[in-house]
């Protein structure tokens, strides 16, 4: 005899019971059930129901599980909670309202402060930072001061973490309230590593190069535009040092990803800067695989430039040419 399927009303009651509970234990138990090898189909349907109907409340519950320091919340449960958050906000692209963004803004910083974070979770946390930042900066038109302080404080002691979070921000950044205060610590750390000739610092160089690129793009239309030329020159000088191909390729691909995520807000200045920088890097490097990455970037950027702004007035696609 077939099992009776739960009705929407029954799912609603179950959701209210789960989401209204102030404790994380029921959510932990639900995650445990969802991660069993032999899953109950009703649990899967209930999960989908919560994602579809209560993404905000459900995601806050999951975030609290991941952020929990309780010993009973195992590493596996926390990682599963993070994967579910990825599904909700990155795959399903669920909306994020003011209340959810506010809760997440505090919890995300707390989670990023942890000394040990799996690579997968760190990447998802950075994606969530970008989602929350977009909601705060672009929709609410406010400043996420806690994020600025976090990145700035990690610029020297945890450079990789600082740059990874910074480069995840794919939207324009407010100059006075966010960008300039952030650059006070982050920019010196980037320039220091761009100029480091030590062999063992190659991975740090890659992070500095990508971080420098993102910083330069954000600074282009600000009162600190002179810093862009300094950054670009240091970046080009560092490429001249002939980095190991593996590091160079990874770095250029990371730059490519950053550009693809930022393109939606580029104007003529950003397009000219990127195309000019790519052309100059291409003139320095000789490795075919690296040149292929640059060519791929150039094609996409040129296509978007023609879509968004048309032809450049004076035909000069190199922003740096106008700085001399």
Image (spheres, rainbow, N blue to C red):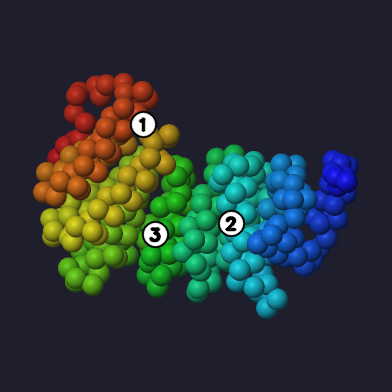
Q: Is residue 12 visible?
A: no
Secondary structure under tag 3 reads helix
The residues bearing labels 3 and 1 have C-alpha atoms spaced at a distance of 24 Å
Q: Position of residue 30 (x, y in %)?
A: 75, 60
Task: Determine the residue positioned at 46% across, 49% down.
Answer: 169
Q: What x and y, as percent, mark residue 165?
A: 45, 57
- Residue 290 at x, y = what percent? 20, 48
- Name the residue beneath numbered marker 3: 163
Rounded to the nearest angstrom, the CA distance separating label 1 from label 2 is 35 Å
| Residue 83 position (above or below residue 263) | below
Q: Secondary structure at mark 2?
A: helix
Which mark's residue is nearer the viewer, 3 or 2?
A: 2
For disc 1, the marked residue is 267
First in sequence, mark 3 or 1: give its number.
Answer: 3
Q: How many C-alpha atoms fall within 10 Å of the one at disc 1: few (<14), some, or many (≥20)?
A: some
Q: Nearer the viewer, residue 137 or 243?
A: 243
* Foreground: disc 1 or disc 2: 2
Where does the image place residue 181, in percent across and percent down from the top left?
43, 57
Q: Earlier in the sequence, mark 3 or mark 2?
A: 2
Give the quarter of the figure containing the C terminus.
top left
Based on the displayed image, in which of its 4 quarters is residue 246 positioned? bottom left
Task: Say which residue appears at 52% left-offset and 56% top-offset.
Answer: 124
How far separated are the C-alphas under marks 3 and 2? 23 Å
């Amino acid at each position: 005899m077939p099992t009776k399927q739960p009705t929407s009303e029954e799912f609603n009651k179950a959701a209210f019971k789960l989401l209204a509970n102030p404790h994380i234990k029921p959510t932990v138990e639900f995650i445990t059930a969802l991660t069993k090898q032999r899953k109950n189909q009703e649990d899967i349907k209930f999960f989908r129901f919560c994602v579809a109907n209560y993404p905000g409340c459900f995601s806050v519950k999951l975030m609290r599980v991941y952020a929990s320091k309780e010993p009973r919340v195992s590493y596996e449960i926390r990682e599963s909670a993070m994967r579910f958050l990825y599904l909700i906000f990155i795959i399903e692209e669920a909306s994020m309202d003011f209340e959810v963004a506010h809760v997440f803004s505090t919890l995300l910083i707390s989670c990023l402060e942890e000394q040990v974070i799996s690579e997968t979770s760190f990447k998802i946390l950075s994606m969530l930072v970008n989602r929350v930042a977009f909601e705060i900066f672009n929709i609410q038109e406010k400043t996420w001061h806690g994020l600025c302080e976090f990145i700035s404080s990690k610029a020297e002691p945890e450079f990789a973490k600082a740059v990874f979070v910074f480069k995840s921000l794919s939207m324009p950044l407010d100059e006075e309230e966010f960008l300039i205060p952030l650059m006070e610590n982050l920019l010196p750390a980037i320039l220091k590593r761009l100029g480091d000739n030590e062999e063992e610092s190659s991975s740090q160089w890659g992070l500095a190069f990508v971080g420098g690129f993102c910083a330069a793009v954000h600074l282009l239309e600000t009162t600190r535009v002179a810093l862009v030329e300094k950054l670009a020159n240091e970046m080009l000088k560092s490429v001249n040092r002939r980095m190991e191909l593996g590091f160079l390729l990874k770095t250029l691909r990371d730059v490519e990803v950053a550009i693809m995520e930022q393109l939606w807000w580029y104007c003529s200045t950003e397009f000219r800067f990127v195309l000019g920088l790519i052309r100059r890097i291409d003139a320095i490097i000789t490795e075919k695989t690296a040149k292929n990455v640059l060519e791929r970037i150039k094609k996409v950027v040129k296509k978007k430039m023609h879509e968004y702004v048309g032809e450049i007035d004076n035909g000069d696609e190199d922003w740096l040419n106008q700085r001399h």
